[in-house]
């Protein structure tokens, strides 16, 4: 081979070797994220969150044109309603007024037949879980939420504040309160100790406010109380309640009846005194407990019946 041709051949081979080496170096220097293996597939789980709760399923079109629908079963919940729950309308539905100013007497609502409602919490229950009582002067804050005014026929100094444990229709032990004439305060604690001992239930016992006395009638109240600065029912003379010398026990279970007037106005179910349901006053137990301190029962009156009412004077 001539020298010129050999030189050219060697030179060409060298150039080709240099180009091959350059290509190999370029390939080795590519960034890693640009060199994706041909067999690698993108991962769906890396970009799609896992669905844990199916709210609704949209129809899916199958390759053959059919539609597949996924049904979601509705969740079911069970709610247990306490038999002692107080109706939301209690004390809120005003009654039409009669000509005498009292509410219209209406049939007892189904929710208040054999009434056994929970006791609203006002004071802490007795720490011992048994009967406890206290007697003392009327605290200023209690007097402020009572019905007492300077026009009342009794001075604050002649009143006392009494707290007593009592059983509720809900089966719990509660603490009730009342303002009563000071000379009867200790005896009143004894009466409620007796009622507690025999398991007589009381729905609610607290101090009545002046606003409640003057409020339009709803006919569904059931407050056990003593001092109420007001006239006697159907009279312009002071009630024995205005002196703290009378007590009403579960008025709804033991209503007032005079001719066609029933108080509370929705309590006609309890005019049948043979029912003998819990909370009703009969001629034993409650009557005997009050008789032991010399107080008399309105259920023994002949001109009218006031089964809730006990008083020192008998009026």
Image: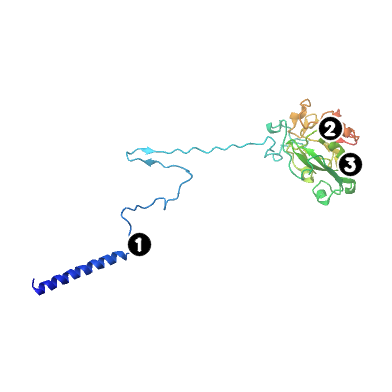
Secondary structure category for the residue under label 2 = helix
Q: Which residue is mark 1?
A: 32
CA separation, marks 2 and 3? 17 Å
Badge 2 crowding class, 10 Å Cα cut-off, few under 14, some 14 to 19, many 20 or more, is many
Sequence-wise, which precedes: disc 2 or disc 3?
3
Cα–Cα gap, marks 1 and 3: 95 Å
- The residue identified by callout 2 is 286
Residue 228, percent across and down? 83, 42
Q: Are marks 2 and 3 in contact (CB under 8 Å)?
A: no
Q: CA distance from mark 2 to mark 1?
A: 95 Å
In which image quadrant can residue 308 be found?
A: top right
Q: Is residue 44 above or below residue 204?
A: below
N-term-proximal mark, 2 vs 1: 1
Residue 239 can be seen, yes or no: no
Viewport quadrant of the N terminus: bottom left
Question: In the rendered image, which residue does mark 3 sit on?
Answer: 186
| Residue 15 found in image quarter | bottom left
The answer to whether 94 is drawn above or below residue 141 in the figure is above
């Amino acid at each position: 081979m001539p020298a010129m041709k050999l030189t050219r051949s060697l030179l060409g081979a060298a150039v080709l070797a240099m180009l091959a080496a350059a290509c190999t170096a370029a390939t080795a220097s590519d960034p890693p994220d640009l060199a994706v293996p041909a067999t690698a597939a993108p991962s769906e789980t890396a970009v799609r969150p896992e669905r844990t709760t199916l709210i609704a399923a949209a129809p899916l079109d199958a390759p053959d044109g059919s539609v597949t629908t996924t049904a979601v079963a509705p969740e079911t919940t069970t709610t247990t309603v306490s038999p002692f729950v107080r109706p939301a309308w209690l004390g809120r539905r005003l009654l039409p007024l009669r000509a005498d100013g009292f509410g219209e007497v209406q049939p007892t609502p189904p929710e208040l037949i054999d009434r056994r409602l929970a006791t609203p919490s006002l004071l802490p229950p007795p720490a011992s879980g048994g009967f406890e009582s206290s007697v003392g002067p009327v605290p200023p804050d209690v007097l402020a939420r009572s019905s007492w005014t300077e026009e009342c026929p009794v001075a604050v100094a002649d009143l006392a504040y009494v707290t007593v444990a009592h059983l509720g229709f809900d089966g719990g032990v509660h603490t009730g309160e009342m303002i009563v004439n000071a000379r009867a305060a200790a005896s009143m604690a004894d009466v409620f100790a007796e009622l507690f001992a025999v398991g007589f239930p009381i729905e609610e016992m607290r101090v009545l406010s002046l606003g409640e006395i003057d409020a339009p009638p709803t006919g569904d109240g059931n407050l056990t109380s003593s001092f109420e600065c007001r006239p006697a029912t159907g009279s312009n003379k002071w009630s024995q309640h205005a002196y703290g010398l009378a007590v009403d026990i579960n008025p709804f279970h033991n209503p007032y009846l005079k001719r066609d007037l029933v108080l509370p106005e929705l309590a006609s179910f309890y005019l049948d005194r043979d029912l003998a349901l819990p909370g009703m006053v009969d001629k034993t137990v409650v009557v005997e407990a009050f008789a032991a301190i010399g107080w008399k029962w309105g259920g023994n009156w002949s001109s009218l019946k006031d089964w809730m009412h006990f008083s020192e004077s008998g009026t």
